[in-house]
Image (cartoon, rainbow, N blue to C red):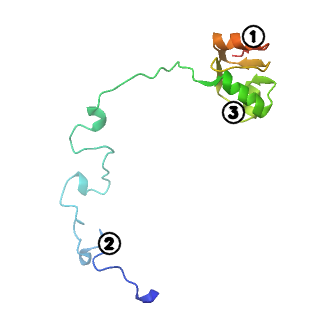
Amino acid sequence: MKLHNLRPAKGATHKEKRLGRGEGSGHGGTSTKGNKGQQSHASYKRKMAHEGGQMPIQRRVPKRGFKNPNRIEYKVFNLGQIEQLVDKYSIQEFSLENLYMNGLISQTDRVKVLGNGELKAKLVFKVNAISDKAKGAIEAAGGSVEIVK
């Protein structure tokens, strides 16, 4: 067997249906589109999600839930995570600029500190929001908290 002898298996390939190429193609005249109607015209394009007159799925399924346009999304850091970040990046001040420079947040992220875990390091916090438990733990460790808008 050589490369020039290779052929697809019998019945594995089909000839391309060349529409609109005249009577000699075997699909002349109406080019297999039938006689009249919207689908036989050149500019016909089926609408997305059209189900042939049946009620479309997006209209059969009920609406659900609510998206609050005023919701503020925060990037959350727990005190236990912050302790690890201090060791890894040797952070003296836990601020938005430091977090962005170390690739932990994006430029538009808002940061909230939560009180899960322990904090031993004495740090200055400049964040968008903080829980009462976290604030108490930071001040007990000798740090300070500043809320940035």
Q: From the viewer's perspective, is the residue at label 2 or at label 3 nearer?
A: 3
The image shows residue 138 at horizontal and vertical percentages of 73, 14
Q: For the residue carrying disc 1, how many other residues have a C-alpha within 10 Å: few (<14), some (14-19), or many (20+)? A: few
Q: CA distance from mark 3 to mark 1?
A: 26 Å
Q: CA distance from mark 2 to mark 3?
A: 55 Å
The image shows residue 22 at horizontal and vertical percentages of 27, 73
Q: Mark 3: which secondary structure?
A: loop
Q: Is residue 136 left or right of residue 70?
A: right
Q: Which residue is mark 3?
A: 104
Q: Who's the residue at 64% across and 27% down the image?
A: 109
Q: Quadrant of residue 23?
A: bottom left
**Residue 70 in the image: above or below residue 12:** above
The answer to whether mark 3 and mark 1 are in CB contact below 8 A is no
The image shows residue 2 at horizontal and vertical percentages of 45, 89
Q: CA distance from mark 2 to mark 1?
A: 78 Å
Quadrant containing the N terminus in the rendered view? bottom left
The one of 24 and 50 positioned closer to us in this rendering: 50
Q: Which residue is mark 2?
A: 16
**Residue 10 in the image: above or below residue 46:** below
Q: Amino acid at mark 3?
A: Leu
Which numbered tag is attached to residue 140?
1
